[in-house]
Amino acid sequence: MLFDSFSIDHLTLRNRVVMSPMCMYSAEQDGLATDWHLVHYATRATGQVGLIIIEATGIEDRGRITANDLGLWNDVQGESLKKLVNAIHSQGAAAAIQLNHAGRKSEVPYLEPVAPSAVPFSDQHRRPQSLTKDGISQVIENFAAAARRAVAAGFDAIEIHAAHGYLLNQFMSPLVNRREDEYGGKPANRVRLLGEVLTAVKAVVPSELPVWVRVSAEEYEPGGNDAEAVAAMLNEIKGKGLAAVHVSSGGVTPIPVRAYPGYQIGFAQTIKDRTGLPVIGGGVITEPQQAEQVLKAGIDLVFLGRELLRNPYWPLQAASVLKETIEWPVPYERARV
């Protein structure tokens, strides 16, 4: 199953291996991609990953996690990302980009962080400013503008980052969101901003280009969201054009997460069962047989993170282990086993 093709809307992937977005903290201070990014992503495409999701990319400067993260709030940044897309496409992989606003977890030193409520992430983080209605409108506009630039850069899909305790996740979480307006309180209100961002993004991208979200389906604290709660919120917005769900967990509070092979698969199964949407699932997947079992459990696509940092050619080796015949890059044919 791992090397079967799979389609999300009109996007067909050559296999079901997904490179999850992982910050490299290697961008220029102005958010431009560097040679590091070019080599990093092109290598995984050469290794036959099916879908590569570019790391969290700030829709505005204060939306970056650090001052060394990628940005997409101007056209120059878009041009720097176009080189990455072209390199990924040249090796047969699809390219998506994760658009993000870090909210209260932003560590850009020269800008004040914002959040749904003025509650810091930890004692070591700055106290954020609570977003006004005008500020919320600007965030929505900035997501749409970044999506428009992503299309111009040639990306095949867009992932809206609503996981790991960043801004959209902060709005969704009852642990963080203490607002008393239409963006706070009941779940339908807390997911409102994500729905409005999804609507704005869908309005500026081609109808055939899939847009999905990444969510934290478990917050690991009493009173926080779990997979059932997140699925219910996703059902509130899926009619706005949601193509799939990339399922992760944690990051809303500093509480440590005990990670082990497949620890997030149950969350992904719940999201799929309750929403009927395709899901991308994973978590400490290192062996080809593990990936196959994840797919047999009903997950549609398997994401790998750190394992692809250790071995960018993991799919080539996985095919050998699973006795699958896949296409190798012609210059590497002599190494086929």
Image (cartoon, rainbow, N blue to C red):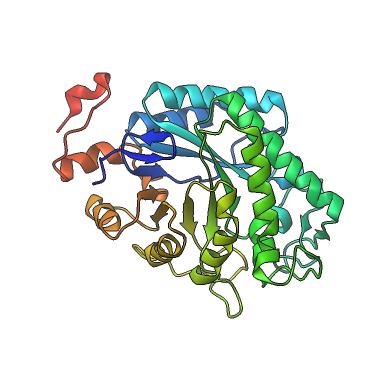
Q: Nearer the viewer, residue 194 or 178?
A: 194
Name the residue rendered at 45%, 65% in the picture. Answer: 274
Residue 18 appears left or right of 64: left
Residue 315 in the image, given as x and y percentages of width and height: 28, 39
Asked whether residue 32 is in view, the answer is: no
Residue furthest out toward the front: 239
Left or right relative to 75: residue 305: left
- 68 left or right, relative to 112: left
User: Which residue is depicted at the point 60% across and 49% down?
Assistant: 240
Q: Nearer the viewer, residue 114 or 173?
A: 173
Q: Is residue 96 left or right of residue 329?
A: right
Q: Is residue 17 above or below residue 125?
A: above
Q: Quadrant of the C terminus?
A: top left
Q: Position of residue 149 (x, y in %)?
A: 65, 29
Q: Is residue 117 visible?
A: yes
What percent of the width, then of the height, locates residue 262? 35, 62
Identify the residue shown where x is 35% and y is 38%: 312
**Residue at the top extreme?**
331
